[in-house]
Amino acid sequence: MATTRDLPSSFHLLAKPTGAVCNLNCQYCFFLTKEQLYPGSKFRMTDEMLEEYLRQYLQAQRIPEITIAWQGGEPTLMGLDFFRRSVELAEKHKPARATLQHTMQTNGTKLNDEWCSFFKEHNYLIGLSIDGPPDMHDVYRVDKGGRPSSARVLRGLEYLKKHDVDVNILCTVHAANGDHPREVYRYFRDDLEAQFIQFIAIVERDNETGFQEGDTVTDRSVGAEQYGQFLSSVFDEWVRRDVGSVFVQIFDIALAAWVGAPPALCVFSPTCGTALALEHTGDLYSCDHFVEPDCFLGNITEAPMVELVASEKQRKFGQDKLDTLTRYCQECSVRFVCHGGCPKNRFIETPDGETGLNYLCAGYKAFFIHVDRPMRIMASLLRKNQAPAEIMEIEARLQAALSRARPSDPCPCGSGRLSKDCHASGAP
């Protein structure tokens, strides 16, 4: 029988108090179909389940700061009183001397003064879903009547700003915004004054189940090369003017890899399995992206959460990320930062015909190669106890030198290549 000794020092849960129920009908959302797993359900976590979840989860953690994360569906549909109770119960059951970090991922359409005052009082970190300027956001992020949602989301953001709530923008990258990286980034930075941004690729399997099966994607999905170019274009803007003032998750993860620090995100870790999903019923699943029958671990009212997390089934789920890595990935020059990406996207073939390559491989590889030189510079700065932001001055000097260099001159970056074959050609 698994015990706490078999557990990692911590594990992360995304709790879904409304299940898949949402007031929006985002066209690419992989989770809306999960309603079919619970026919006849009211899709509301009961107060009894709320306390049982928090008690078991908090008592299983062996770290000084514990994150309590809510997602959906749309979690605000539970109403504010539910989250007031969650804070009270978390304080009741938290380990001695532990501190709590409350987070919520929301579409923002239901937020008002009362919600945001509560968030500020309890130091919530809010992830807000925005896909760029309204004309791009509203292509896929619509309500049940097909109406655009951007105006309501931006109203919610104003409430968050009014109450000085910490906000992280989560932008999905897809067919509608994938060719407009700088426009999207500048909108977040300049118009919305965002400081923390995530760019998440939409890879939507073309099937009727919503499960991770099949090897084709919908037309809404971002292309692999398109995603790599999106990230590279945003990076080029960021590295020349925004280092230290705007924080983009995948750039932070890349820098950590170049420094040699452990990955902070399961997607780019060698193994996974410590980021699970809890449904409103108490059903525990291996991962938020695998809420499907094959990855069901059990219900926390029928088996202790720690036993489910430490079960052989869950350990195998996490270890398979490493054990099924293709030879193409094993021999890749950027494996140290990528580690094959998320298993949910490993459904295409390698150039030599091996199954299990990540759909986004071409984009990841192009991006990580593109940022190699500036990442090495920033990593060197960190090792000297200097700020990575100093790279902006280094980049400014490089751009000035490039403006004076002739195509046949050695490239000012020091690569040893001619300028025409290096930075003047757009190469990294």
Image (cartoon, helix red, strand yellow):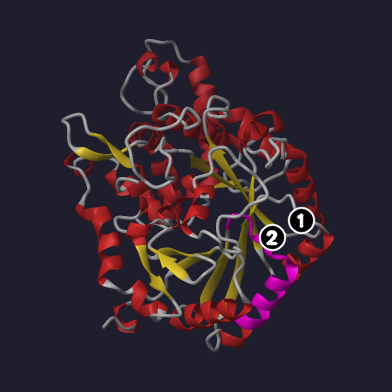
Can residue 272 be seen here? The reply is no
- Locate the C terminus and report the quarter of the image it occupies: top left
Please state which of residues 229 and 261 is positioned toward the viewer in this rendering. Answer: 229
Asked if disc 2 and disc 1 are in contact, CB closer than 8 Å, the reply is yes
Residue position for label 1: 111
Q: Write down the region rendered in magenta.
A: 72-90
Q: Position of residue 367 (x, y in %)?
A: 40, 34
Q: Position of residue 179 (x, y in %)?
A: 54, 24
Please state which of residues 163 and 235 is positioned toward the viewer in this rendering. Answer: 163
Figure quadrant of residue 265: bottom left
Can residue 28 be seen here? The reply is yes
Q: Position of residue 66 (x, y in %)?
A: 52, 74
Cα distance, mark 2 to mark 1? 8 Å
- Tag on residue 76? 2
Q: Amino acid at mark 2?
A: Thr
Please state if 359 lies on the left or on the right of 115 as rendered. Answer: left
- 399 lies above or below 266: above
Q: Position of residue 288 (x, y in %)?
A: 45, 57
- Locate the N terminus and report the quarter of the image it occupies: bottom left
Please state if 119 lies on the left or on the right of 257 as rendered. Answer: right
Q: What residue sits 35% from the left and 46% below the top? A: 341
Please state if 48 lies on the left or on the right of 282 as rendered. Answer: right
Q: Is 77 colored magenta in this rendering?
A: yes
Q: What residue sits 39% from the left and 23% below the top? A: 427
Q: Amino acid at mark 1?
A: Leu
Label 2 residue SS: helix
* Magenta highlight: main SS: helix
- Residue farthest to the front, as pictured: 40
Label 1 residue SS: loop
Please state which of residues 47 and 163 is positioned toward the viewer in this rendering. Answer: 47
Q: Nearer the viewer, mark 2 or mark 1?
A: 2
